[in-house]
Image (cartoon, rainbow, N blue to C red):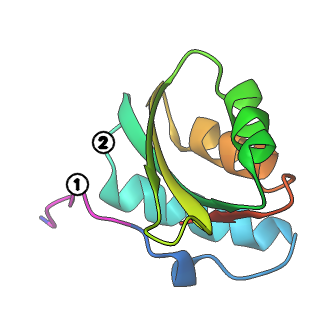
Amino acid sequence: MEEKKTNKDIEFTDIPEGTSQDIYVNLKEKLESVEKFPGVYNFKFIITGGLEKIQDLRNILPNDEFIEQPSKTGKYVSITVKKPVQNADEVIAVYKQAGSIKGIMIL
């Protein structure tokens, strides 16, 4: 019996560019193979272009824990958001919403 792996990071390169539904099917498969649901998922983002972008992200995730780490040069902010989720579909829904913010990189 194959053991289900948990707590592995999914790399940004694992998510192909584009808006095809196949991208999200692939992401869902990867999430379900490496994460344990329900649980707390750590969303990671890089934001450039000002503090208003952070507020845009907070509007999507209003009740969740934000950990902000500005870069040494101040050109970007690395953000981790800890959010309780029930399944991979909830993770994907957040990524879709966050992807609409200009100046955000999803990791």
Percent coordinates x, y for residue 3 in the rendering: 14, 62
Dots 1, 2 in contact, CB < 8 A = yes
Which image quarter holds the N terminus? bottom left
Q: Residue 33, can we see it? A: yes
Say which amino acid is labelled 2: Lys
Label 1 crowd bin: few (<14), some (14–19), many (20+), radius 10 Å: few
Image-based side of 60 in relation to 63, left or right: right
Image-based side of 14 in relation to 105, left or right: left
Above or below 16: residue 19: above
Image quadrant where residue 103 sits = bottom right
Label 2 crowd bin: few (<14), some (14–19), many (20+), radius 10 Å: some
Percent coordinates x, y for residue 62 in the rendering: 65, 19
Distance from the alpha carbon under mark 1 to that under mark 2:
6 Å
Q: Mark on residue 26? A: none
Q: Which residue is denoted by mark 2 in the rendering?
A: 36
Residue at x 69% of width, y 82% of height: 16
Image-based side of 13 in relation to 18, left or right: left
Q: Main secondary structure of the magenta part?
A: loop
| Helix, strand or loop under label 2 | loop
Above or below 101: residue 71: below
Residue 17 falls inside the magenta stretch: no
Q: Mark on residue 6? A: 1
Q: Residue 85, can we see it? A: no
The span picked out in magenta is: 2-9
Residue at x 53% of width, y 44% of height: 88
